[in-house]
Image (cartoon, rainbow, N blue to C red):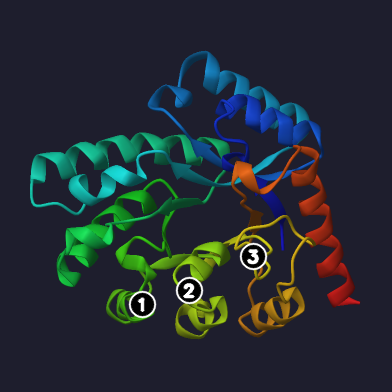
């Protein structure tokens, strides 16, 4: 498994600076959270490419700032808006392919939109197939305030879409949904292609790795049963740690835990 961290951990530090702060600390696997459209062009994009090349960084996935727009654009009932967002995401897919990244993280519709299941899957499938033209896979993430918090809905996606759906498991979002992350793995684990990981305790649902009580050994065992060999990306919120070094330490701690498990 490739273990790394997301530039989202450093928000609101600008994305190219966040990438540099991770790279200079030895984090070699990253998820890039894009915070504006212009970060994929011009000097900003050039800076990111320079950091990636100089430090040997492997970009595993992209996460778009436009996630909150997906409810009314991608999953709404106004086709022109849907086309607009898909055109925007095509540009992202092109850059993902250029950087060698395979995965694109989708939040999807928030709960209050009450979008029909069949329409949701129709739109997801449309985006999934377009992304595949660029060699990119769109991953549905479990999000506590979105339709995707519901295990039964994710299971329905898996059943109906067959081999044309893949998922992100986010452990902190599982906690915030009041659901055990292992229950998600029981339901859709064979199609989980990416993981956002964090530690936790009885007082905080998102902590640096090694600062809580999460059962990583149990997780590694379950992932082995599923033959999972993709990335695990540390994703924390800025209020959950005090210094950037803690992000590197979380990556190292997770690598150490996996090494100990492997024996």
Task: Identify the residue under disc 2.
Answer: 191
Q: Position of residue 34 (x, y in %)?
A: 48, 35
Q: Position of residue 7 (x, y in %)?
A: 60, 39
Q: CA distance from mark 2 to mark 1?
A: 8 Å
Residue at horizontal 47%, vertical 25%? 39
- Mark 2 is surrounded, within 10 Å at the Cα level, by few (under 14), some (14 to 19) or many (20 or more) other residues, namely many
Q: Nearer the viewer, residue 87 or 214?
A: 214
Q: Position of residue 225 (x, y in %)?
A: 65, 85
Q: In the rendering, which numbered label is found on residue 263?
A: none
Mark 3 secondary-structure assignment? loop
Q: In the rendering, which numbered label is found on residue 203?
A: 3
Q: Marks 2 and 3: which is nearer the front? A: 3
Q: CA distance from mark 2 to mark 3?
A: 31 Å
Q: Is 159 on the left-hand or right-hand side of 263?
A: left
Residue at horizontal 30%, vertical 35%? 88
Q: Earlier in the sequence, mark 2 or mark 1?
A: 1
Mark 2 secondary-structure assignment? helix
Q: Is 82 on the left-hand or right-hand side of 69?
A: left
> The C terminus is located in which quarter?
bottom right
Q: Position of residue 158 (x, y in %)?
A: 36, 77
């Amino acid at each position: 498994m490739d273990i790394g961290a997301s530039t989202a951990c450093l928000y609101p530090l600008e994305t190219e600076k966040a990438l540099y702060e991770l790279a200079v600390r030895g984090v070699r696997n990253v998820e890039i959270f894009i915070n504006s459209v212009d970060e994929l062009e011009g000097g900003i994009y050039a800076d990111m490419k320079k950091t990636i090349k100089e430090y040997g960084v492997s970009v595993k996935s992209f996460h778009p700032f436009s996630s909150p727009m997906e409810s009314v654009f991608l999953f709404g009932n106004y086709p022109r808006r849907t086309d607009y967002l898909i055109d925007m995401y095509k540009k992202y897919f092109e850059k993902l392919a250029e950087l060698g990244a395979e995965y694109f993280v989708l939040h999807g519709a928030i709960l209050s939109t009450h979008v029909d299941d069949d329409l949701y899957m129709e739109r997801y499938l449309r985006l999934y197939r377009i992304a595949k033209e660029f060699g990119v896979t769109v991953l549905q993430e479990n999000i506590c305030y979105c339709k995707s918090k519901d295990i039964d809905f994710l299971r329905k996606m898996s059943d109906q879409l067959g081999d044309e759906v893949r998922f992100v498991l986010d452990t902190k979002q599982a906690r915030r949904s009041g659901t055990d992350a292992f229950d998600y793995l029981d339901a859709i684990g064979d199609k989980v292609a990416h993981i956002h990981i964090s530690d936790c305790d009885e007082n905080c649902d998102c902590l640096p790795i090694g600062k809580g009580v999460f059962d990583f050994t149990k997780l590694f065992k379950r992932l082995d049963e599923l033959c999972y060999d993709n990335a695990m990306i540390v994703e924390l919120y800025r209020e959950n740690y005090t210094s950037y070094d803690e992000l590197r330490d979380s990556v190292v701690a997770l690598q150490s835990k996996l090494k100990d498990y492997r024996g």
